[in-house]
Image: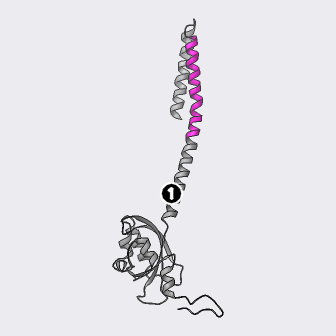
Amino acid sequence: PWPMAKGSRVPPLDARQMYETAPLGIALCDPGLRFLSANRMVESIFGYAEDELRQLGLDDLAHPEDEPSVSRWARAQSPPDEAKAPARVERRFVRRDGHVVWCRIALSGWPRSGSAPVVLTVEDVSERRAAEQRLREGERLVAVGTLAAGIAHEINNPVGSVLASAQYALMVMDDPDGAEKVAEDLRNIEAEARRCGQI
């Protein structure tokens, strides 16, 4: 247990208890990123008990499409430099129940040399990713709506001209010079129809 500060009313902090109750997934892994121990949050995120996780490596949990990039990223960080900020990446992983979960993972070195374990932190960011996806879809829908409104406005003008020409042609076709007027209206209708096609 960690000692209390002088005059503190807070009970001594037990490192194992802090590790187990942390709101962030924390695991110790060997240099090949095979699990040595994992806290409850890691168990919750991946759906495996700690003794089951000890039989697995991080790449075993990676989504098949993301596994190569997880392996490359892990190799690039090996061994982690404890003097630097932890390396982070977001990838998809597959829970024990088959559900896909987006996780932000980070590696940091253990303050010892040699084949010491590395500290892996895991944060479930699925909800944030889903919210971002909904936002992107909403923005796309707004863009499509704006485009559709603009196109409707652009088409409205030639369609109005087509309607006016057709109505005028019907009115004047029995006039002595009606054939010439109707021919002119038909040419206008053709031109406006082509304009609609271009829009």
Furthest-top residue in view?
176
Q: Residue at x 36, y 67 (%)?
A: 97
- Residue 174, percent from left and from top: 55, 7
User: Relative to 169, does residue 84 appear above or below in the rendering?
Assistant: below
Query: Would you name the residue on which mark 1 appears?
Result: 133
Q: Is residue 173 left or right of residue 96?
A: right
Magenta segment boundaries in residue numbering: 148-172
- Residue 94, percent from left and from top: 38, 67
Q: From this viewpoint, is residue 32 visible?
A: no
Compare residues 68 and 96 and report the one nearer the observer: 96
Magenta includes 33?
no
- Residue 193, percent from left and from top: 52, 27
Q: Is residue 95 left or right of residue 88?
A: left
Q: Residue at x 50, y 63 (%)?
A: 127
Q: Is the C terminus in the top left, top right, bottom left or bottom right quadrant?
A: top right
* Residue neighbourhood size for the residue with mark 1, other residues' Cα within 10 Å, grouped as few (<14), some (14–19), many (≥20): few
Q: From this viewpoint, is residue 35 visible?
A: yes
- Residue 1, percent from left and from top: 52, 92
- Identify the secondary structure beneath mark 1: helix
Q: Quadrant of residue 150?
A: top right
